[in-house]
Image (tube, helix red, strand yellow):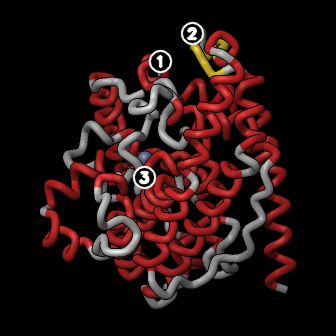
Amino acid sequence: MYWQMYYRFIWLVILSTFFSVVVSRPIQAASNPGPVLRKYGGPKWGFYAHQQINRLAVFTLPAEMIPFFKKHIQYLTDNAVNPDKRRYAVVGEAPRHFIDLDAYPDTLATTLPRFYKDAAERYGADTLALHGLVPWQIQLTKYQLTEAFRKQNVRQILRVAADLGHYIADANVPLHTTRNYNGQLTGQHGIHGFWESRLPELFSKEYDFLTGPAEYIQSPQRVAWRAVFRANAALDSVLRIEQELTNETGDTRKFGFDERNGTTLKVYARDFSQRYHDRLSGQVERQMRASVKMVGDFWFTCWVDAGQPDMAKLAKRELAAEDDQAEAEEKKSWLKRLFLARDEN
Ligand SMILES: [Zn+2]
């Protein structure tokens, strides 16, 4: 019975993903102001991929959670990129999206403390902030979401669930685990947006997002770290394959031009993208699917840890209009700061 429902949902997802891909371009263009896109080049895990990951994670949830999460699926999708939008407006936001594992050469994999308190004691909070916090941020946000479920605070559940989805997705991106996050140390400037924005935008329509239903996570910290280390293990091919292809192709055929919002952008050429994507042998798809599964698992785990509050009841509550207004104002202020901030790509 449960599986039947699950498959029905998956088909819904496949169809809705297909249609959103087909019809979403003008909508995206309308909601992304031109200057921000130009300045931002390729946004983190692309806005598109982040939105898809939060959206698809909803369909991994058990029947008890579905009424609430389906009702608010648009909110979770639209707000999947809040943490990126507030990077320059909120103090302390920027380091939550990554971890430079190579900044800790002698302690990689084995001895880097898994809990924030221990790590801060060993290295100091400033050092941790400098090299990124994402695995600890996932643990913290997991705690916050559990609290929101416990309080049965609809607005807070949605806000924190959207954020948690974002941080988890970031942790699964290989280039979010290194100091060389944009290929700037190896003459591959732009590879960040290429891998996490351009490739999913071009190819994720073909991806298989069947993940199986959400599962309870015994140790959130272990799962967060495992994701980061797995992403890091893929980093070598991300950089090496791009370099090999560049050597074969030459710079002139590597790039092309794309029209967006009436602006001409220099982008990685379609043919180059296709060849890179082929040689990565499903890597972007695997990382995206791992993100979807992990987001579902975390949302589910928070709900269980909060004592499984009645989500059908919560689904009946409406969001207060004045809170909507306040949230819209808040986002406007992030965007203003984002526009003024320096370009990272
Ligand atoms: Zn991010």
Q: Does residue 162 appear in the picture of this structure?
A: no
The residue located at (61%, 19%) in the rendering is: 267
- Please give the label number shown on residue 38: 1
Q: Which mark is residue 263?
A: 2
Q: Give the CA separation, mark 3 to mark 1.
A: 25 Å
x and y percent of residue 161 in the render? 46, 64
Q: Amino acid at mark 1?
A: Arg
Query: Residue 252, relative to residue 197: is it above or below?
Result: above
Q: Earlier in the sequence, mark 3 or mark 2?
A: 3
Where is residue 197 shown, x and y percent of the image? 59, 36
Q: Please report whichever mark, 3 or 1, sits nearer to the chain's N-terminal start.
A: 1
Contact, CB < 8 Å: mark 2 with mark 1? yes
| Residue density around tag 2, few if under 14, some if 14–19, many if 20 or more, within 10 Å | few
Identity, as a three-letter code, of the amino acid under mark 3: Thr
- Image coordinates of residue 73 in percent, x first then y, are 61, 57
- Secondary structure at badge 2 equals strand
* Residue 5 can be seen in this image: yes
Which type of secondary structure does the marked residue at label 1 adopt? helix
